[in-house]
Image (cartoon, rainbow, N blue to C red):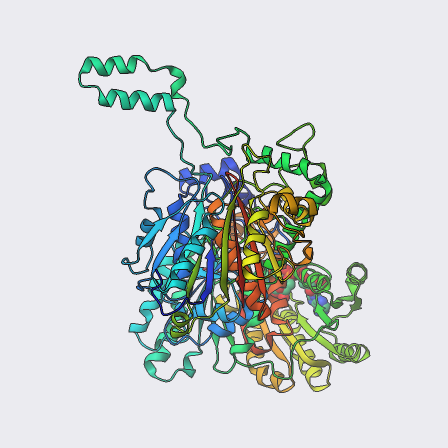
Amino acid sequence: MLSAAAPRRVAIIGGSRIPFARANTAYAELSNSDMLAGALQALVDRFDLHGQRLGEVVAGAVLKHARDINLTRECVFSTTLSHETPAYDIQQACGTGLEAAILVANKIALGQIDCGIAGGVDTVSDAPIALNDGLRKTLLRAGRARSVGGRIAAFGGARPSMLKPELPRNAEIRTGLSMGEHCELMARRWNIARADQDALAVASHRNLHAAYEAGYLNSLVVPFEGLSRDNNLRPDIDPGKIAAMKPVFDRRAGTLTAANSTPLTDGAAVVLLASEDWARERGLPILAYLRAGEAAAVDFVRGDEGLLMAPVHAVPRMLSKLGLSLQDFDFYEIHEAFAAQVLCTLAAWEDAEYARERLGLAEPPGAIDRAKMNMWGGSLATGHPFAATGGRILASLATMIDRRGSGRGLISVCAAAGQGVVAVIEK
Amino acid sequence: MSSGTPSGDRYLDFVNGPVGGLLAKRLGLPTPVRLVRNGDRAAKARPVLVGAAKGARLLSALAVNFAGQHVVSFYHHDAESWREAAEEHGLMSGRFGERSGRVGALVFDASGIETVDGLGALYRFFHDSIRAVCPNGRILVLSIPPESAGTAEAAAVQRGLEGFTRSLGKEARRAIAVQLIEVAPGAEAAIGSTLRFFLSPGSAYVSGQVVRIDAESGQYASGTTRRTVLVTGAAQGIGAAIAELFSARGDQVVVLDVPAMADKVAETATRLNGVGLPLDITAADAADAVLQHARSCGGFDVVVHNAGITRDRTIARMERAGWDEVMAVNLRAPLRITEKLLAGGGLRPNGRIVCVSSMSGIAGNPGQTNYALTKAALIGLVKRLAPAAREAGATINAVAPGFIETRMTAAIPFMVREAGRRLNAMGQGGRPVDVAEAIAWLADRDSYGVNGQTIRVCGQSLLGA
Ligand SMILES: NC(=O)c1ccc[n+]([C@@H]2O[C@H](COP(=O)([O-])OP(=O)(O)OC[C@H]3O[C@@H](n4cnc5c(N)ncnc54)[C@H](O)[C@@H]3O)[C@@H](O)[C@H]2O)c1
């Protein structure tokens, strides 16, 4: 599949996202297409891509309407990009955005394309509501019936209870437990204290606020629908109030609260990737290079591994291929699905027994310098529109590295169904 | 005062209430919007929408001023050049479109317009954007002084912007204030304080004005030391509001008023942590006394000639004394004191002199031939003294208040008062603090480029030029 003389480096040119909004607030009336097209157009504006035909645009959404079979391609039509730009949708739960970037990057590296946009979008406000499965089957059966009598007979099977719509649930299909309940189990397994989770949440808000105040996010965020900052951000977050909040997933003995878990969020983020030559020909900046990506999955159903522990496995696998150690990084971006998820990840990397038995490593990957983690805030403060998070993190991290002049950063994103997507970027 | 407190204007309170608002709408009555001023419940900071005609010269100065203030901006699709300027200065910006939401201000750089055809950019921008401005929003058009234009056509279209902004001010409504800011070539870097003021809540009652910035501050750059501010007629009314504002901003105020008000002078001075100066400015040695006080405190940084009186009578009925008193207080005193201070070194470097004129002096008013003469004379005075002031490293300007809610206006018969209140684009009277805010802007250390001008604080009165 190599279409170039040799594999090429993949440059991260820049990213655009709209401010993230808590569900049912600023973007309550918007669809995934509205938001994804908004972020895409902002990227096109910023890098003057009007009328240009790109290699491809790849994006996705976790919560998607049936009508959005070509969500990303339809969004291309809404922008000033050349309408001859191909596009496709992908979906890997919260890993969608980062996985999209890895796919585009692979094609660039192989010479199949010279440039592309990767990203993601999600709305919980405009979530698809499905027909009750019983009603749906009744309707389908009636449609198949040949006679009027047969149709009436089919409707005879309808029950009032079938009128109850099916709302998308944040629950694992195979265990019936919500993601928060799963994370509670992990927090218990790894003895993660409530106070540590709360401290991580407070740091997330403080870091994000500081980044906005310093103007670091000005090249990454575009004002949209009356917002110019993420509206989940609490600049003057009060640790006392956070500590007083009641647990939400396990009301009796739990440690996860609304503050140390990500809120349901609406938003979109996209990133422009290209070969070095393509960027240079257009005089575009190169923030950093996407060096490696890796996905892993764990069996949280039968095995006794935690639902959100896949990145713990993915990172050492990727690092061994690159000959890097966990300490060889200047920045760490660990997606804060829950504060507890981040803390479990860090704890597992430091645990010698776990390293031997689960990761197959003689030595544990070890501790990281926490001061280098999520320096411009994480998902707890920013919010987490599932598929948009990967693009947000990738563009922010690349900008951090560019501001520093050089450096290496690690991205780790956990995802539903026991999956994880991780990447290394550097310059 | 917060936006929820009564204003002394019952109608304004009524139509801004739940029942009155509905009723006024049904009956088609005018519905003035309550002005948001400094200190009112902070309205959400909204983005600024920037537009520009080809050849715009002020975008980079604009971006420099927006940077560091967290100004979020949109650019109109005709103004790609703003995207570049914003990016260069690290500002957050996005293209204006249907998903942009409401904006707090429109800023259009018209400095590059040289032809009649070029005015199309002005039309497109305002046609597309005027509805996006939220109530209490701001509109600024940036231009060049017409006489500095290269051709007759360019001079004509630049001068034409004045008619455009004044009309826009009258149709924008919803407490939106509109100004034209003429920036002379070479003075681009001096727009900061003027931009800040006219985009801030402080300028709520100033609209339809033309402001010229024609010099860079040069050696008279901003400082931070506490300034000494003399305010005449400061025991009460507008003068007290002026003294209060300067004091609140950390300056040392000298509260001057007639000896008969000595108690009130002392009280005000104490309250504002300032100095009292009981003095009749019409006294023979008044100018000497003011200069002496100036020398005793190392010179004044700011002098506000606010003391003023009315002796209203038609010219046929007017007594000679009423004529003479008004001349003495409103005109001769500020004239003599200013001359004395300038000649005697009573003003410190980067000093500021501001005279309080009046809309009467611009539009005229029956029964005020004497008063209007003196208030118009101040306009002439600041214009004439401007070059000398600048030579001394200072500026001299005037403000011309319109209908300001004070003891004086409360005494006017109801119908006349209602007319005075409503006959302006804001549909309401101003407050003493509105005059004070405009003076504070002219007195700003960075307002060196504004000199010899008269700025009206009248909510864009329907009367007068
Ligand atoms: N109120 C308005 O609507 C309005 C409109 C336009 C202009 N103005 C101008 O604003 C200024 C202040 O007006 P105001 O409404 O606060 O009036 P005011 O009468 O409340 O205050 C004026 C002050 O000046 C003082 N003063 C008068 N003669 C003096 C003298 N010889 N020496 C020292 N002090 C003297 C008075 O004692 C008084 O305290 C005046 O110049 C007035 O002409 C007011």
Identity of the residue drawn at 80% across and 66% down: B276
Q: Is residue A241 above or below residue A292?
A: above
Question: Where in the image, quadrant-wise, is ligand 1 located?
Answer: bottom right
Q: Provide residue B150's location: percent of width, then percent of height.
A: 37, 85
For the view shown, which residue lies furthest in the left direction? A147
Identity of the residue drawn at 30% across and 64% down: A51
Left or right of B203, for residue A83 = left
Quadrant containing the C terminus of chain B in the rendered view: bottom left
Q: Is residue B420 visible?
A: no
- Tell me where residue B392 sits by quadrant: bottom right
Q: Is residue A156 visible?
A: yes
Q: Provide residue A305's location: percent of width, then percent of height.
A: 59, 38
Q: Provide residue B210's location: percent of width, then percent of height.
A: 48, 70
Q: Is residue B4 above or below residue B95?
A: above
Left or right of A329, for residue A89 = left
Number of labels in the image equals 0
Q: Nearer the viewer, residue B18 or A422?
A: A422
- Tell me where residue A39 sits by quadrant: bottom left
Identity of the residue drawn at 25% across and 12% down: A153
Q: Is residue B246 above or below residue A153?
A: below
- Tell me where residue B378 sits by quadrant: bottom right
Q: Provide residue A179's location: percent of width, then percent of height.
A: 56, 36
